[in-house]
Image (cartoon, grey):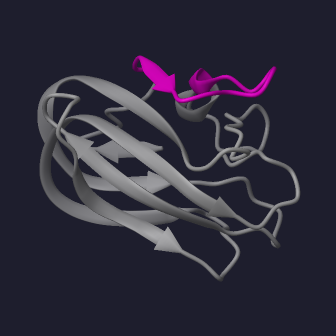
Amino acid sequence: MHPHHGGLQSLRKPVTALSSETGRPPEAANDGSRSNSPYWGGPLTFGPTWWRVGLGATCDVSRVNVRNYVDDTRYYTYRLEGSVDGVHWFILGGRSGPRPADAGDTMQTEAQASCIRVVVLRRTARSTSPK
């Protein structure tokens, strides 16, 4: 995930997730690599999951790119949210299939946020690993 304001704000900033699969930690989602490996894998076994990055301070967020696992077949339904306090969240964008993701989804925003999170609602892959 890549929030921008005069540059990449989310790169290697502190992250958390509701849960993670072994070997697929939250830190893999903002490590600067746009490949499928490594990636964060969050199980959807019992319902939605989420991944969140703290930007360190409230800043202007003009563009966010969310890149899911890319294999030309799977697609995701998710909500992109922002917060200035980590408690109250507002919607910045999202995706609701049914096209496979490729380079990811880029959402233009005029928001201020100190935290950004992706709430993954559904995916079509057989595995339980959204990226």
Which residue is depicted at the point 68% across and 27% down? Answer: 20
- The picture quadrant where one finds residue 80 is bottom left
Which residue is depicted at the point 81% across and 21% down? Answer: 22
Judge left or right: residue 62 versus residue 96. left
Outermost residue, bottom side = 98
Instruction: Give whichever of 87, 103 is nearer the camera.
Output: 87
Judge left or right: residue 70 versus residue 40. right
Q: Magenta segment range?
A: 13-27
Judge left or right: residue 84 versus residue 94. left
Q: Tell me if residue 113 comes above or below residue 70 in the rendering.
A: above
- The picture quadrant where one finds residue 15 is top left
Image x and y of residue 86, in percent: 23, 29
Q: Is residue 12 visible?
A: no
Image x and y of residue 115, in percent: 27, 33
- The picture quadrant where one finds residue 36 is top right
Is residue 22 a member of the stretch shown in magenta? yes
Q: Is residue 36 visible?
A: yes
Q: Tell me if residue 107 comes above or below residue 66 in the rendering.
A: below
Outermost residue, front side = 46
Which residue is depicted at the point 59% across and 26% down? Answer: 26
Is residue 131 a member of the stretch shown in magenta? no
Judge left or right: residue 18 versus residue 44. left
Image x and y of residue 119, in percent: 46, 49
Instruction: Give whichever of 42, 100 is nearer the camera.
Output: 42
Image x and y of residue 64, in percent: 36, 53
Prevalent SS, magenta region: loop
Marks counted in the figure total: 0
Instruction: Give whichever of 4, 107 is nearer the camera.
Output: 107
Which residue is depicted at the point 58% across and 54% down? Answer: 67
